[in-house]
Image (cartoon, coloured by chain):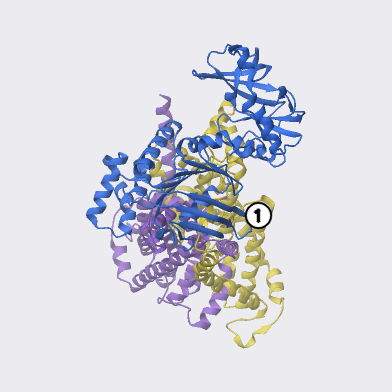
Amino acid sequence: MAEIVLDKVTKRYPDGALAVSDVDIQIADGEFIILVGPSGCGKSTTLNMIAGLEDISAGELRIDGERVNERAPKDRDIAMVFQSYALYPHMSVRENMAFPLRLAKVDKATVTRKVEEAARILDLTQHLDRKPGNLSGGQRQRVAMGRAIVRNPKAFLMDEPLSNLDAKLRVQMRTSVSKLQKRLGTTTVYVTHDQTEAMTLGDRVVVMRGGHVQQIGSPQFLYEQPANLFVAGFIGSPSMNFLPATLENSELHTPLGAIPLTDRVRRLAEAANAPREVIIGLRPEHFEDATLLDDNEKSRGGTFNATVDVLESMGSDKFAYFTVEGETATSAELDELAADAGSADLTDGGAQIITRLSAASQATEGAETTIWFDADKLQMFDPSDGRNLTYTE
Amino acid sequence: MAAIGAKTRWALIDIVVVVYALVPVLWIVSLSFKTKETLTDGNFVPRSWTLQNYVDIFNTTVFLRALVNSIGIALIATAIAVVLGTMAAYAIARLDFPGKQALVGVSLLIAMFPQVSLVSPLFEMERGLGLFDTWPGLILPYITFALPLAIYTLSAFFREIPWELEKAAKMDGATPAQAFRRVIAPLAAPGVFTTAILVFIFCWNDFLFAISLTSTEASRTVPAALSFFTGSSQFEDPTGTISAAAVVITVPIILFVLFFQRRIVAGLTSGAVKG
Amino acid sequence: MSHTVQQTRPARPDKGKRAVSEGKKAERKLGLLLCAPAALVMLAVTGYPIVYSIWLSLQRYDLRFPDQQKFIGIDNYVTVLTNSYWWTAFGVTTLITVISVAIELVLGMGLALVMHRTLVMRGLVRTVALIPYGIVTVVAAFSWRYAWTQDTGYLARLFAPEAALLTERVPALAIIVLAEVWKTVPFMALLLMAGLALVPDDLLKAASMDGASAWQRFTKVIIPVMKPAILVALLFRTLDAFRVFDNIFVLTNGAQQTGSVSMQTYNNLIKGLNLGIGSTMSVLIFLAVAVIAFLFIKVFGTSAPGGDGGKR
C-alpha cells in the first residue's frame, strides 16, 4: 500500500529530447490511476521512471513520502506487468510466479503457498507446471499478473497489459483486472493508449500529450469537462464532433447554421474572453432525430437538414454519419489526434459529423433528415491554444 | 493425386541434393577402406575392405601429433574467440557507446579480408616474437578471423532476446547480476553454443595459416599435415593413409551437422543476412 | 527494407533501446570495456601487420640474403606488376572467381528453393546440405583429386580414362571450379534461404491472384524482394572466392599455370622466402579485394550486413 507522488518529474534524453516535462501527479493509496495518451506522449516513460527502469532527469518521485529517485527498481517494492508479459521462457508458470519471492529469499513453504494462492485467484492452478510458450495469450497475461501479485508489492505498474489480447478477451480481462485491483486494494498505475480502457478502469485518468499532462480527473469529469481540444477529442468514442464557428452578437455562425448561445454558454464564453473565431464541439449523443422530439424540446437547441451518408444500427441506438459542407475545424491538437487515429488524410470535402440517434429514428441512408442538437451541451474551444472556453471546475 | 505427384517430384529433387552432398564424402571414405592392391582400381565401392589405413595413421606420431594440435588449437581459439565475441556482441546489441559503428565496420573489414595478405607480415612478426611454429602462433590469427563471425552471429542472437525480461527481473527484485545469471544467461546460452560450433568449424578448417605459420610437427594441424603426407612417404602411395586421416577429421564435422543442423543454419543465416 | 514493413504496433519513441537506465556514462564505459579485448586482438593481428606489410613491400628483403635488406620504394610493385606470372595468376583468380560465383548463384538459388519449399525430408536435405559447408576444404580437395586421378578415380574412369586431366590446364581449372562450387553452394544457399524467408507468402499468393506464373513470381516478386540478401551473398562469396588457395594447393599445386594470387604469394613467401615480393603481393591482393567490396557497396548498393547495428 502506498501513496505515490510525482513532483515536477522530467525526463530529458542526452540528445536533448524532452520526453516528459514537469509532470505533477498525486496518486492516493489504493487508487487505480490511468496514464493515457497517443503514441509518444511520454506515458510509458513516466511509468518506467516510477518503476526505476529509467532515470529521472529532474523533479522528485516520492513513495509514501520518501524520495526514491536514486533507488534501484528492486528496492522500490513495486511490481510491473509488461505489454509483452515478459515471462521467462525457460521457467514454468510456477517458477515464473515464484521468481520474485525466491529473489527475496522467502522460505520455500511460503513461496509454494503464495504461488498456489495466486494461481487459484487467477485460475491458473492446472497450468502451473507448463512453460509460457504453451499458454494462450490470456493465460500468459494472467501469469504476468500472478507474478506481480504474489509478493504483495506497494504498487502495481501496468504497461498496456491488455493490448496484445484480442478484442473480446480484452474486455473480459479488463473486468478481471478491475476486480482484482479492488480486491487487493493496491495502488495501481496503468498505462494505455486506449481511451475505452482508461474510461472503464480508472478511478482517475491522466491524459498526456507530448510529455505534458493535459488534464487529470475522473473519467466522467474528463468526458464532460475536457480542459482543451485535445482531451475533448481523445476521450469519448465515437469522438466529439468539431466544427469551425464565428462568434458574433451572442450567436455562433457554423456550417450547421446560426446557433444562438444559451445563457450558460454565453456566461462562460464571456468569462473566458472568447475570441471571434472558435471551434465548437458536440458529442454524438447530443444530437437527435428531430421528428422524435416535441417543439418544447426542440426549442432548446438548433436543427439542420442533411443527407445521411452512412447509418449504423447498433440495436440500442443508431449512428448516423453526415458530411457538412464548408470548412473543417483545424488546430494542432486536432491534427495530432487525426494522425494518431490514422485518419489524417481521410477528410475530403467538408467535415464529417457523427450523431447518435434513438433506435426509433426512421432516418435512412441517402435520405435527407432533420437533425436536432442540444445547444446547451455545446463546448467552445480557442483554436490558437486549444483551451476549452466553456470549462467549469 | 496431385499432392502425391508433387511429393514424388520433391523426393526426387531431394535425392539429387543428397547425392550431390554425399558422393565426394563417401568416395574418400571408400578410399580409406580400400586395400593397397585395390586402391587404384577406380571403383566407387571397395572390392575388398580393410582397416589397415586407420591402423597405420594411428601408429604414426605425424598424424597423432597433428590431431592433438588440431583439437587443442581449435578448442582454445574457439573458447577465447567466443568469450571475447560474446562480450563485444552484448555491447553491440545492448549498449549505446561511441565507436560501436567503428567496431562493426572493422569486424566487417576483417571478415572480408584476404587472409593471404596477412601471411607475409605475420610470418615475419611471429619469427621475431618467437611465435612461429607454436600453438599461440596459430591461435592468434584464428581468434582474429573468427571474431567477426562470432560477433555477427552472437549480436544477431542477442538482438532476438526479449530484453524486457531483464527489466521484468529487475522489477521482480533482481540485482543486475542476478538478472543476468538467472534470466539472460540461460536464454543466451544456445546462441553462444551455436557460435562456438561455427567458430570451431572455421578453425578446424583452416589451411593457409596452418601451412604458412608452422614448419614442424610442433604445431602443424591435420589439414597442413595431410599435404605433407604426400611428400614424406615417397616409397609408398599415401592415398590410403591420407584418405583415412581425412575421414578422421571429417567425423566431428559430420557429428556437428547431424546433431546441431538447426542451430548451424540459424547461426549462419542470422549473422549474415540482416540487410 | 524498412519502408516495406508495415508496423504492426504504433512506434513508441518513449520506449525502446533507451530504456537502459543506470546512467549513460556507466553504459558507455561498460560498452567500451566489453569491446576492448576483441578490438585489441583484431587490431593487433590485422591492423599492425597491414601497416607492417606495406612497409615490407617497400623493401628489398629476401630471407636468403638478409644482409641486402634495403628500402627500394616502389621497385617491388614494378617488379610484380610487370611480371607475367603475376598477371597469369591474377587472370586465373579472376576467372575462377567469376565462373564459380556465377554457378554458385544459380545452384545456390536452386538449393535454397529446395530447402525452403520441399514437401518431404526437409530436415534431411538441410542436414545433408551442411556437410559440404562444414567439411575441411583440404579433405574435399583430396577427394576430388583422387576422383580425377587417372586409374585411381571413379570420375576419371567414367569420363576420361585415357587422360590425366589434372595435368592439363583447362580441365584442371574446371576441376578447381567444381571443387569450389561443390563446397560453397550450400553456404550460398543458406544465405539465400534466409532471404527467401523474408518473402511473405501472402505476397506470392497476391501475385498468383494477379495472374503471375510461377516463373513471373520468381523473377518479379521473389528476386526483387530478396535482392539485398542476394547481393550480400554475392559479396561474401566473391571476396571469399578471390582468396582461393586450399583447393588449388591440393589439386594442382599451381602447376600448368593454375595458381591463384594467393598461391603466388605463398610461393614467394614460404618457398621463395622473398618477404619483399610476398608483401607486395599481399598489399596488391588487399587492394583488389577492397576494390571489389567498394564496387559491390557503391555500385550495387549492397548494404553491409549488421551495418545498422544498434537499431531495428
For label 1, the SS is helix
Res B238 → quadrant: bottom left
Locate the N terminus of chain C and report the quarter of the image it occupies. Answer: top right
The chain drawn blue is chain what? A
Res B80 → quadrant: bottom left
Whether residue B39 is visible to the viewer of this picture, yes or no, is no
Q: Residue furthest left?
A: A109
Is A231 placed above or below C188 here?
A: above
Which residue occupies the foreground of this view, A26 or C14? A26
Residue A148, percent across and down? 37, 49
Which residue occupies the foreground of this view, C228 or B26? C228
- The residue located at (46%, 40%) in the rendering is A203
Residue A93, percent across and down? 31, 46
Which residue occupies the foreground of this view, A387 or C182? A387
- The residue located at (47%, 70%) in the rendering is B210
Mark 1 belongs to which amino acid? Ile
Q: Residue furthest bottom?
A: C67
Whether residue A174 is visible to the viewer of this picture, yes or no, is yes
What hue does chain B carry in this figure?
Answer: purple
Question: What's the chain of the residue with tag 1?
Answer: C
Which residue occupies the foreground of this view, A134 or A292? A292
Q: How many marks are shown on the rendered structure? A: 1
The chain drawn yellow is chain what? C
Residue A391, percent across and down? 62, 37
**Mark 1 surroundings: few (<14), some (14-19) or many (≥20) residues within 10 A:** some
Residue B9, percent across and down? 43, 33
Taking the image as shown, residue B201 lies to the left or right of residue C1, namely: left
Is A278 placed above or below C159 here?
A: above
Q: Which residue is mark 1?
A: C297
